[in-house]
Amino acid sequence: MEFNLSEEQRAIQEMARAFAAEELAPHAAAWDETRTFPVETLRKAGTLGLAAIFVDDAHGGSGLGRREGALIFEELAAGCTSTAAYLSIHNMVAWMVDRFGNDEQRARLLPPLIGMTHLSSYCLTEPGSGSDAASLGTRAVADGDDYVLNGSKAFISGGGVSDIYAVMARTGGDGPDGISCILVGKDAPGLSFGKQERKMGWNSQPTAAVIFENCRTPRANRLGAEGEGFRIAMKGLDGGRINIAACSLGTARAALDATKSYLVERRQFGRSLAEFQALQFRLADMATELDAARLMVWRAAASLDSGDADATMYCAMAKRFATDIGFRVCNEALQLHGGYGYLQDFPLERHVRDVRVHQILEGTNEIMRLIIARRLLGR
């Protein structure tokens, strides 16, 4: 694995950094406070190719690898964690359409996803099936040229606002082999949404239950064959785990940068806080752990791009480690700011609120440990 970035990778990184500095960071606090979903800003990201990072360039996407994606999401999250995380989810759905869709589906669905004229959501979790995703109960029954869906999905980012929902539904028997991936449009008859959830963080993106009551969608909207949905969902999550780990890196880096400045400027006992060795050591540990997490994310990205047989394990390792470290660094940064860190006038409390959920979504960190252990033990 090459540690130094290529000229192209540096250009991609700088583009994402500039977009985050100009379009995300100045508004992040207000979006959080007012729970504003910045759709027009997301569409600006789409014009830069940031809505189809992993979509083949032959199909209109950016055609980038997972390492480049990690660079992008780290930079975007340094500007606004919540908005960057929604872009990660949208990119997951666009990649699934590109990777598992047929030519007709790509031609019909990708152009509006690439430009973000259509927003998308990933629908796996249910009220009764979180970590045990293969036990999901939403059912899709074939009826002529349609599927009729019944059931519900929980905690869906973009719920009620997104235009396209990638739904994992049971078309066969129990277990993972009975699950298919079916795309449902926002205007599908029988589709409705729960109330917008009031969350600890991630307030610049809507979150709601997605409810199917005899909901009809064309069978032509199924990605892959019947029974392949769970495999498609898990493949999507491998990449999603790298992305959300990278989002943790970006938020933690922003918190670390703010802390370095604060320690230099803040004076107590007649000298700056940066002169106290105890605080220097804490800053050094934060930087060291953050760099270690970044290297794990890059390793996972390289393994996924190369088709390594252990890629799923490496993605789980990176997600577990980087999201834990990201929260730890943000929390430590808040502590080093003292009372000011607890105020909404400073970004630290928002960083802590936003990264906390990264240890839960895309598979909890407990499930990441289970994935790793099963691979190590051959189970």
Image (cartoon, rainbow, N blue to C red):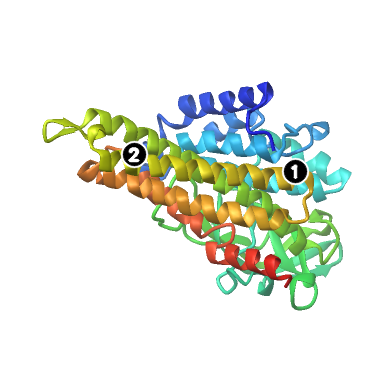
Residue drawn at point x = 43 percent, y = 31 percent: 25
Badge 2 element: loop
Q: Nearer the viewer, residue 282 or 81?
A: 282
Residue type, numbered disc 2: Pro
According to the image, label 1 marks what residue?
A: 305
Nearer to the camera, 97 or 265: 265
In terms of depth relative to the viewer, which is nearer, 335 or 141? 335
Q: Quadrant of the N terminus?
A: top right
Residue pictured at 64% horizontal, 62% vertical: 124
The x, y position of residue 143, in whole percent, is 83, 68
Q: Is residue 82 left or right of residue 57?
A: left
Q: Residue farthest to the bottom?
A: 174
Q: Nearer the viewer, mark 2 or mark 1?
A: 1
Q: Which mark is residue 347?
A: 2
Above or below, comparing residue 69 to residue 217 in the picture: above
**Picture quadrant of residue 156:** bottom right
Residue appearing at x 58%, y 24% in the figure? 15
Image: 346 above or below 311: above
Residue 294, located in which quarter of the rendered image? top right
**Is disc 1 placed on a helix, strand or loop?**
helix
**Kind of residue indicated by mark 1:** Asp
